[in-house]
Image (cartoon, rainbow, N blue to C red):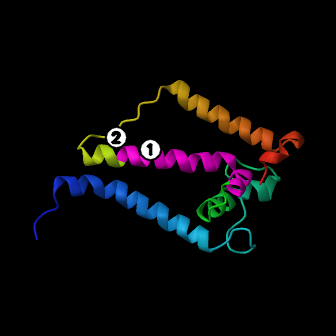
Amino acid sequence: MGRPTGRVRRLATPIGILAAVAGAFAYVGSVDPNEPGHYPVCPLLKLTGVLCPGCGGLRSAHAFITGDLGAALEANAIATVGYFLFAAVWVLWLVRAWRGQPLRIGLAPVWWWGVGAVLLIFTVVRNLPFGSALAP
């Protein structure tokens, strides 16, 4: 058989990324992070007692993959929003790859600073008593 066509090559990377993400979600969906001993503890939480922006992400992914969107949001709202954002960017990537167009998402530095600020605020608030609803 000959070399793969251009379209097949262009689609290989986004499909490969989706396969890896689907495999990771399938594993987290089948091995419940709510049961101790299956996953390592967050090193920042273990050493300092401070919740990082990713704390609760595995519980969020487990709830998300098992269809409990409310529990996913409660475990880690930022991660849950990230799942939807990943899906939207992935679909855009796949469509552009199908059409032979590169995926270019040009965000101005102010957007990256904004994302960093949101993550920082989320982290600080979830570690304060009044922000306990954001804690996993």
Number of marks: 2
Residue 35's spot in the image, x, y percent? 74, 73
What residue sits right under mark 1 in the picture?
A: 89
Magenta segment's dominant SS is: helix
> Marks 2 and 1: CB-CB under 8 Å?
yes
Quick one: label 2 or label 1, which is nearer the N terminus? 1
Dot 2, how many residues are within 10 Å of its Cα: few (below 14), some (14-19), or many (20+)?
A: some
Dot 1, how many residues are within 10 Å of its Cα: few (below 14), some (14-19), or many (20+)?
A: few
Q: Is residue 83 magenta?
A: yes
**In this rendering, would 52 be left or right of 108?**
right
What amino acid is at disc 1? Val
Front residue of 47/94: it is 94
Residue extending furthest toward the left = 2
Residue extending furthest toward the right = 129
Q: Residue at x 72, y 64 (%)?
A: 41
Q: Is residue 76 magenta?
A: yes
Taking 127 as reference, is 115 above or below it?
above
Residue 19's spot in the image, x, y percent? 42, 64
Image quarter of the N terminus: bottom left
Label of residue 9 in the image:
none
What amino acid is at disc 2? Leu
What residue sits right under mark 2 in the picture?
A: 103
The Cα atoms of the two marked residues, 2 and 1, are separated by: 9 Å
Residue 123's spot in the image, x, y percent? 74, 42
**In this rendering, would 19 be left or right of 82?**
left
Helix, strand or loop at mark 2: loop
Magenta region: which residues?
Answer: 70-93
Q: Residue at x 23, y 56 (%)?
A: 9
Rendered image quadrant of residue 81? top right
Image quarter of the C terminus: bottom right
Helix, strand or loop at mark 1: helix
Q: Residue at x 40, y 35 (%)?
A: 105
